[in-house]
Image: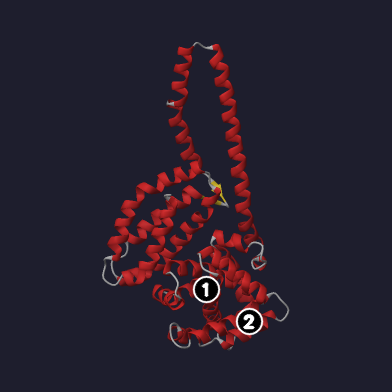
Amino acid sequence: MAVNLVSLIMQFLTPDMIGRIASALGLDRNNTQTAIGAAVPGLLAGLCGVATQPGGAQKLVEAARQQTGALGSFAKMVGDSGQSSLIEKGSQLLSSLLGGRDQTALAGAIGKYAGLGQSASGSLLGMLAPIVMGTIGQQQGTRSLDAGAITSLLSSQKDNIVAALPAGFANLLGGTGLLDSLGGAARAATAAAGQAARVTTSAARAVGDTGRRAAVSLNWLYWLIPRLAILAVLIYLFAKPAEQVAQQGVTAVQGLTVGGLDIGKQVTDSISNLRTTLAGITDASSAQAALPKLREVTAQIDRVDGLLGQLSPEQRKVLAGVVNPLMPSLNQLFDKVLAIPGVAELLKPTIDALRAKLTLLTA
């Protein structure tokens, strides 16, 4: 079975663990979860770059060996007297691997994306660094941990890292160089948003030109047709065709591709998968099994949220019109699942984040 470091790290960061990290740092749980979802692939992207530098792979080997017991001791140190030491050592570890400039750039991007300050995002990275390196060391094993093996492992993770990078966050990292080692896929992901914005602007300009031509035609018609005839024409133009235009708008948005993503299809598919996943939760055990799927749906919706700024107000309204009618039944499903004994402790942070991200689509 192929290794996915992003998934392995996120499995370690359970909802309870994320809650403890948020509490220890004095942060909102949802913001912390959003930050971690960006930070984990961001850190791995940075480490991929380190592995390609002269002597970088050996630095990673030494760092991974130092963190072989990090996963076992991490939970004990969060919120305890050893927390400051954990953050300080993790920050020093990152500085030695990424360098101060890239470390600061990564922390700044996480802060902007998740709504955290630079200091808070820096502390979070200091906490996550031992987890990431500990997972790499655990996956390789101390005996097979060498420069070649760790380079090969990180190289095999590039597709997984690109897939896990939230769209809005990838844009923030676009000019830092931290994604350069991931190759063309990452560059395409960050460039797509700019291209989509240009396409949207061109489309809006075309619509404006059409409107101006229509206005000219109506003005010409006004001077040639008696007033009663004009009244009839205006009623026809502004009543019946409005329904057709609205329907065309729905179809256009549902088929709209922004940043390489068909937004309408992504939203409907994600909600369908969400319903199926929620329906299969009957107890704490099935809830634990469903958690990766819920996180996957959250990442999909998050990607859509990151592209909302590239939609026109009319397209936003149409998208909201698709999602709004579905929210009451989804909220009932969320509440039903959370009422199952033992489930809320596992899923509430993820479900709360999902609610918030879906709500953004209805605005």
Q: Is residue 171 visible?
A: yes
What kind of element bears circle 2? helix
- Earlier along the polypeptide chain: callout 2 or callout 1? 2
Q: Residues within 10 Å of mark 1 (few under 14, many from 20)?
A: some
Q: Is residue 48 visible?
A: no
User: At 47% from the left edge and 52% from the top edge, which residue is drawn?
Assistant: 266
What kind of element bears circle 1? helix
Amino acid type, mark 1: Ala
Q: Nearer the viewer, residue 126 or 354?
A: 126
Query: Relative to 85, does residue 260 appear above or below in the rendering?
Result: above
Figure label count:
2
Q: Nearer the viewer, residue 227 or 92?
A: 227
Place of residue 74 in the rendered image (x, y in percent of width and height, measured from the top left): 47, 84
Place of residue 209 in the rendered image (x, y in percent of width and height, measured from the top left): 61, 31
| Residue 95: mark in rendering | none
Query: Relative to 226, does residue 271 appear above or below in the rendering?
Result: below
Q: Based on the displayed image, in which of its 4 quarters is residue 223 positioned?
A: top right
According to the image, label 1 marks what residue?
Answer: 120
Query: Relative to 32, does residue 260 appear above or below in the rendering?
Result: above
Q: Nearer the viewer, residue 338 or 79?
A: 79
| Residue 60: mark in rendering | 2
Query: Relative to 322, does residue 215 appear above or below in the rendering?
Result: above
Describe residue 319's horizontal placement relative to residue 348 as left or right. Answer: right
**Which residue of the protein is positioned furthest toward the right in this rendering?**
54
Q: CA distance from mark 2 to mark 1?
A: 25 Å
